Image (cartoon, grey):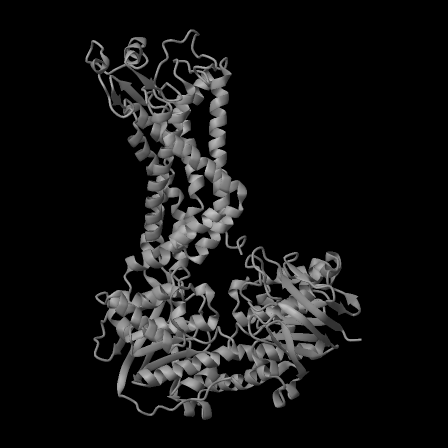
Amino acid sequence: MPLLEVKNLTVGFSSRDEQQALAVDDVSFSLDKGEVLGIVGESGSGKSVTALSILGLLPYPKAYHLSQSSITFNGLELLNAQENLLRGIRGSKIGFIFQEPMSSLNPLHRIEDQIAENLMQHQQISKREARKKVLKLLLLTGIQNARKRMKAYPYELSGGQRQRVMIAMAIANNPDILIADEPTTALDVTVQQQIIDLLLKLKKKLGMAIIFISHDLQVIKKIADRVCVMKSGKLIECNSTANIFSNPQCDYTKTLISSHSPLKINNNVLGGPFLRVDGLKVWFPLKKNFWGRVEEYVKAVDGVSFELQRNQTLGIVGESGSGKSTLGQSIVGLNKFSGNIIIEKQGAKSTNREKGLKAQIVFQDPYNALNPRMTIEEIVREGLDIHFSHLSDKDKIARVLIVLQEVGLNKDVLNKYPHEFSGGQRQRIAIARALVLEPELLILDEPTSALDVTIQAQVLKLLQDIQIKRNLSYIFISHDMKAVKAMADVIAVMKDGKIIEFGTSDKIFTHPENPYTQKLILASL
Amino acid sequence: MYKIANISSVLQLSPISRRRLAAFSRNKRAKYSLFIFLAIFILTLFAEFLANDKPLLVKYQGDFYIPVIRDYSDLTFGGDFPTPADYKDKYTIDKIEQDGWLLMPPIPFSFNTVDYDLDKPTPAAPSSDHWLGTDDEGRDILARIIYGLRLSVVFAFLLTFVSSVIGIAAGAIQGYFGGKIDIIFQRVVEIWESLPQLFILIIIASIFVPTFWSLLFVLICFSWISLMPMVRAEFLRTRNMEYVKAAMAMGASNIRIMFKHILPNAVVATITFVPFLLAEAIVSLTALDFLGFGLPHEYPSLGDLVRQGKDNLHAPWIGITIFLVLSTLLTLLIFIGEGVRDALDARKNR
């Protein structure tokens, strides 16, 4: 008998006005002891809903199952089971790790208390024993300074450390199954690798089975024994990891595997220097003394210099907190900085208004980047309203339509609002907004990180096409080495506000010199 | 439902607003409360035509006169003095009816008409002449309530509108610019807030005789603070959104960003509070009138009726009437407010 068996699982959400499609549609799979099952799919494919229904964590009664659905754990039916029974299983027999380590820990409690709570809920032990166990668990997760960290509040920990705490909580009661819902998505590449290694180590040590949910096949490949591919609520393919990658059956699986990144298009026609950044420093005050003099700074960007050619793409890579976004935002004038940023034919002291004509920025999160109260037309033409207010409405709309067409959207979108679009389409709109002023430099601040893998590839392709058509220079900021490889001619590796390695893309990828760069590249392959 | 769908298509509302409007109209209690409140308010706007001691229309010697709107002297209707005509006077009425007719409003008393024809001591109990009785000065209570409602609601609307505008502007400046401006402004507001509002009003009332406008001004001085923290928080939050940064990178001016990008998002949070602010404004005006520090005697105020109800416990119709009027008015506003709040709540309205 398998440890966990999901049979014909169907989940729907009833809503007041509209008929919604089923979130999960007739999904069956099983999980054996000590096995790692990977579930892969785009956002909205129903993989998280499947995981949540195993523990009965869906918003019932809004969510409902069809009658033939069944989930059995050790022969015990979990679907529509008594809340008491489920409570005994949650956190004890089945552990759960959520995606967002930022929001899944209570900010008001020490991590020691949060892990101990889980222990005392399921085991009859005293507070002192619980505390000892917490220390053991934290040591097990390999968190540095475990004894000291017990007294820490979540905000004092980094993302990776928080995820380790979450794992400690999930394995506190020696569960038979650990469900990990995108546990590495919000983390930096090097930290991702560490978390995966940790999960594999724990699996061996504790003999538990793992359901590992991710949108990223590369991550799944590293950890899973078997892989299930989900699309629009349906399970379309299930096979051993080796078979899935060597011999995928469904077309969708094939695109998932192959779509990873478009190839770099070489554009050797460089047009001479375009942007020069000289000794750029962005320091944020951290501590002030009694007289208001700043005593301590966060050195977000600390003395960065480089030169960018026309038609060239500079890739900036580094972990979160390395200052790569701050650098990008300084170039379009969103931060105060010292040092020089000189865009061709403009003085060092150009205003945002003047810079707006030469350099534009595309942000990471397509959900935050568009004002929800403006129509697409208003969003895209705003730049024209600011800089070309003398144009007639007709001319403005004509120019808006040109850029929309360029990013692959047609006339119908003009009067729609951002919430009617998917993430990929929103990112296209954001690109159109940046292009409408016909800039010569585009700062792309993680433009694909929030998108599904297949969409990522499309957006990267689009950016390549636009670059060739418009002779643009790009600054491509990303933590995703694959995307950088596809886009960049030259690469700057940033750490703690400094550029630690700078060179052509080929050189960085084949002969990285700095140990940190080597680690980054190793983790991403 | 049909009507509301029409309105939204005519006004070309955004889909979000349309969904909110639909959510509001789904809440039956709030919807009907809004209709009743609007009906009452619109009726009271025409108070002069409902309760007045002047006729709506007079036909005299073949000519039409409209005393509601224009003043005519006694001489016009064949009287002897060049004084304004007194249409309650038997003599005038006889004169007019000899050669024409006159049409009185349904309640032939204005808020300050003292009924000298009463055959009972004041306050007089409800009768066919005075449907809700009279107060202790012989004035018709129904007429006073109609005028009083208009005064209270108009006062509350003005107070809420002006203090919202000031509050939103102050909150916007603090939230958007942040830093030193925010800190200094916050401290000033804290000091300002700790001033004892009631005592200041009492002091002012003992120096000047308050009028409608001066009382409005003094109350605005204190009530603008209530909306400010929310708008400030909303601006603090929204100014870090990426679409605001994108607009900055485009070179948009501060004013443009505040008005086009942040304000529409902040307004939603503030609209929720408007019905509650209205109710609060009505209560504070009534309370001040009740205590005698509000509007002077010649205004038809609800608070004055509350005071009369308290002073004349042997005439329960005064107290009961004003209690019913005030509680209905405030309940309607609270129901509307709850409906608006639920309709704007993103979590409930998915």
> Image quarter for residue A471?
bottom left
| Image quarter (top left, top right, bottom left or bottom right) of the N terminus of chain A | bottom right
Estimate the x, y position of residue A133 in percent, counting from the top left: 69, 66
| Residue B323 against residue B42 in the figure, above or below | above
Numbered-mark total: 0
Q: Work out which residue is located at the far left of the displayed protein and give it.
A: B82
Q: Nearer the viewer, residue A171 or A485?
A: A485
The one nearer the camera, A457 or A97, is A457
* For residue B52, above or below residue A159: above
Residue B295 image offset from top left, x and y in percent? 34, 25
Residue A186: x %, y % from top left:
52, 72
For image coordinates 79% across by 66% down, the residue present is A76
Residue A42 drawn at (x, y percent):
56, 74
**Residue A485 visible to the viewer:** yes
Q: Left or right? Give the position of A383 relative to B228.
A: left
Whether residue A292 is visible, yes or no, is no
